[in-house]
Amino acid sequence: MTNVSSAAVNGVAWIGTLMLVFYRIGDVGGRVAAVFDYLGEISFPLYILHYPVLFVVSSSLFKAHPNLNYGITQVAISLAAAALAYHLVDRPLRVPGASLAQAARAWRRYSSAP
């Protein structure tokens, strides 16, 4: 990707982010609300995992594939890692009386699913 197209993608991402944060008309409903609710649910795993993902991706993946868009790739990998951590660790441990053993059983169920 050239510098111009990468700058254009980053510019569109910034404009979209600013519109989401500052431009709100009425209540957000339907699927948009569900997406924002889910992002709120995975926000803590995302906060915890984004820096290790940033380190690993920038030290390995981008050296092997320097033409990838850094921002989009890092966000996508961070979101995927946060979603996995939420479903396999965070959510099973939120159940009253849950233990790490129950989280491990949830992990085995998920990894053995077809």
Image (cartoon, helix red, strand yellow):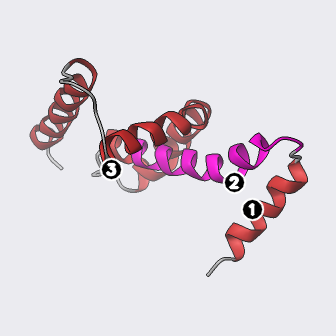
Question: Circles 1 and 2: CB distance less than 8 Å?
Answer: yes
Badge 3 vs badge 1, beta-carbon distance below 8 Å: no
| Label 3: how many Cα within 10 Å (few below 14, some 14–19, many 20+) | few
**Residue lying farthest to the top in this orientation:** 22
Q: Which mark is residue 107?
A: 1
State how far apart marks 3 and 1 are (Cα): 34 Å
Amino acid residing under circle 1: Trp
Q: Secondary structure at mark 3?
A: loop
Please give the range of residues in magenta: 74-97
Say which amino acid is labelled 2.
Answer: Leu
Q: Closest to the observer: 79 or 40? A: 40
**Residue 48 in the figure: left or right of residue 66:** right
Residue under label 3: 66
Q: CA distance from mark 1 to mark 2?
A: 6 Å
Q: Amino acid at mark 3?
A: Pro
Q: Main secondary structure of the magenta part?
A: helix
Q: Position of residue 101 (x, y in %)?
A: 90, 54
Residue 91 lies in magenta, yes or no? Answer: yes
**Residue found at x 64% / y 48%:** 85
Dot 3 or dot 2, earlier in sequence? 3
Q: Nearer the viewer, residue 85 or 31?
A: 31
